[in-house]
Image (cartoon, helix red, strand yellow):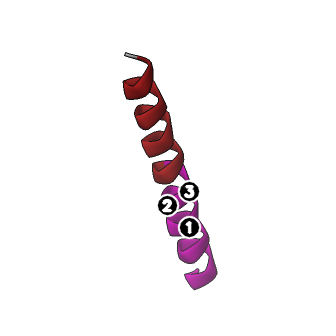
Amino acid sequence: MLEDDMLKSENELVLNSKVTELIKSLSLLV
């Protein structure tokens, strides 16, 4: 259970950082 939660939060962090990078690159294009 605990390991699953840690994995989930880690994945969310990675996803958040990717989304942030995408937004940054998009704002650069505009």
Judge left or right: residue 4 versus residue 26.
Answer: right
Q: Can you identify the residue that label 2 sits on?
A: 13
- State if disc 1 and disc 3 touch (CB < 8 Å): yes
- Please state which amino acid type lies under the numbered disc 1: Glu
Q: Residue at x 49, y 42 (%)?
A: 21
The percent position of residue 24, horizontal first and vertical second, equals 42, 36
Quadrant showing the C terminus = top left
Q: Amino acid at mark 2?
A: Leu
Gap between marks 3 and 1 measured at Cα: 6 Å
Which segment is the magenta one?
1-15
Q: Nearer the viewer, residue 11 or 5?
A: 11
Q: CA distance from mark 2 to mark 1?
A: 5 Å
Q: Are marks 3 and 2 in contact (CB under 8 Å)?
A: yes
Quick check: marks 2 and 1 in contact, CB under 8 Å? yes
Q: Where 14 falls versus 24 (above or below)?
A: below
Residue under circle 3?
14
Question: Is disc 2 placed on a helix, strand or loop?
Answer: helix
| Residue matched to label 1 | 10
Q: Indicate the position of residue 20 as horizontal and vertical percent values.
A: 43, 44
- Is residue 3 placed above or below 10 in the rendered structure? below
Q: Was residue 29 drawn as part of the magenta stretch in this picture? A: no
